[in-house]
Amino acid sequence: MNDLGAWLVSVAGTPEGAQLATILALVSALAHAVFGAMQKGRYDPWLTRGAIDAWLCILSAPIALFVVPWPNLTTALILAGAIVVHFAYKVTMALAYERAAYTVVYPVVRGTGPLVTVIAALLFFGEYFTPVQWLGVACLSGGILLLAVRNIAEEVIDPRTLKIGLLWALAGGCLVAIYTTYDAYGIRQTPDPFTFLAWFFFVTAIDFPLLATWHYKRLKVQPVLGPLVWRGFVGALIAWISFGGVLMATRLDKVGEAAVLRETSVVFAAFIGWFIMGEKVGPRRLFLMCLVALGAVIVEMGG
C-alpha cells in the first residue's frame, strides 16, 4: 500500500493523474447517490447513518491501526477538525431527510455544494476556472437546483416542514463545500494518502453510532435491528468508494473539478428514485438531468 500511495503522489498534477481523478470522481458520484438513497429508505435516517458509521469504524480500524503508517501531529490535528466538520454535516443531513423527500433534499444539497466549493478552491488553492468551465458550473448547479424546485412542486407535506427541510438542505450544501475543501487540504498535507483515508474513516465515524443508540432508545416503536445492521455494512463499503474516491480525486487534480464531477450523482440519484424508490421522472426532470450531465462535460472539456 505504501508503494501505491507513493505512485499516486507521483502522478498528482499530471495528465495521468487528471484522468484517474476524473474516473474516481464519477465512480464516487454513482456510489454517493446510492449512499444517499440508503439514508432515505425504510429506516430512520439517524439509525441508518449510525449503522453505517459503526461498520466504518469496525472495517477501518484494522487498516488504520495495523496497515498504514500512523498520522503525524499535523495530520492528527487535521483529523480532529474533520470530526467536527463531518459531525455537523451528518446531523444536518439527518434533519433534512426527516422533513423532506429524498428527491428534494438531495438536489438542493448537491446543487449548492459545487458552486461554493469552486469558489473556496479559488480562495484556498488558487484554482482558476475558465469562462467555459464557469458556464458548465452554471449548467450543473442550475440544473440540480431546478430539479429540486420541480420536485418541491409535487411535495404534499406541510409547507412549514418543507421550508425547514430546505433550510437544513441548504446548510448541508454549504457544509459539503466546507468539508470538501477541508478534506482536500488534509489529504494533501499527509505524506501517505492512505493514512489520511483510513484514519479519516475511523475517527469521523465514532460519533454517530453513539448518537444513533441514544436516538433508538427514545423511539416509541423500535425497529428490528437485523436488517439495519446489514444495510449499515453495505453502506460502509459504499462510503469507502464514495468518499474515498472523491478524496483521492482532490489529491490527484483540481478540487473544484472533482467537486463538480461528483455532483453528477444527482443524475444517478434521480434514476435510483425512479427505478428503485418508485418516484416519478417526467420529461422536464429528464431534461434537467441532461443539463446536469452537460454541465459536467463542459467543466471537464473546458479546462
Image: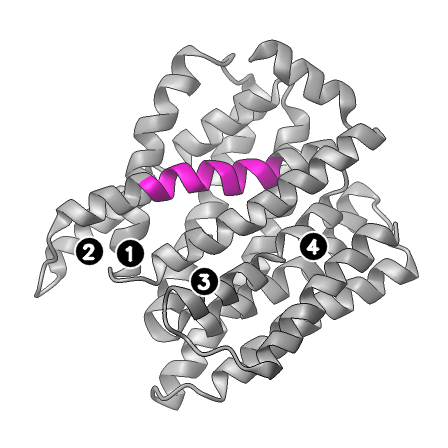
Q: Earlier in the sequence, mark 3 or mark 4?
A: 4
Query: Are dots 1 and 2 in contact, CB under 8 Å?
Result: yes
Q: Which residue is mark 3?
A: 272
Q: Position of residue 130 (x, y in %)?
A: 91, 56
* Residue 11 point in image, percent of width and height: 77, 23
Residue under label 1, please give it: 46
- Number of labels in the image equals 4
Q: Which residues are magenta?
A: 234-247
Q: Of residues 233 and 114, which is closer to you in this image?
A: 233
Residue occupying the point 12% across, 57% down? 223
The amino acid type of the residue labelled 3 equals: Ile
- Seen in the image, is 53 located left or right of residue 148? left
Local SS, label 3: helix
Of badges 3 and 1, the one in the foreground is 3
- Asked if the residue at tag 4 contacts the one at tag 3, i.e. Cβ–Cβ closer than 8 Å, the answer is no
From the image, tell me which residue sits under label 2: 215
Task: Please tell me whether mark 1 or mark 2 is closer to you in this view.
Answer: 1
Q: Separation of disc 1 and disc 2 at Cα? A: 7 Å
- Nearest to N terminus: mark 1 or mark 2: 1
Q: Disc 4 or 2, which lies upstream in sequence?
A: 2
Give SS at disc 4: helix
Tell me whether circle 4 and circle 2 mark residues in contact (CB < 8 Å): no
Residue type marked 2: His
| Residue under the point 60% across and 75% down | 286
Task: Measure the C-alpha gap from mark 4 to mark 2.
Answer: 34 Å
The residue that disc 4 covers is: 260
Comparing labels 4 and 2, the label whose residue is closer to the camera: 4
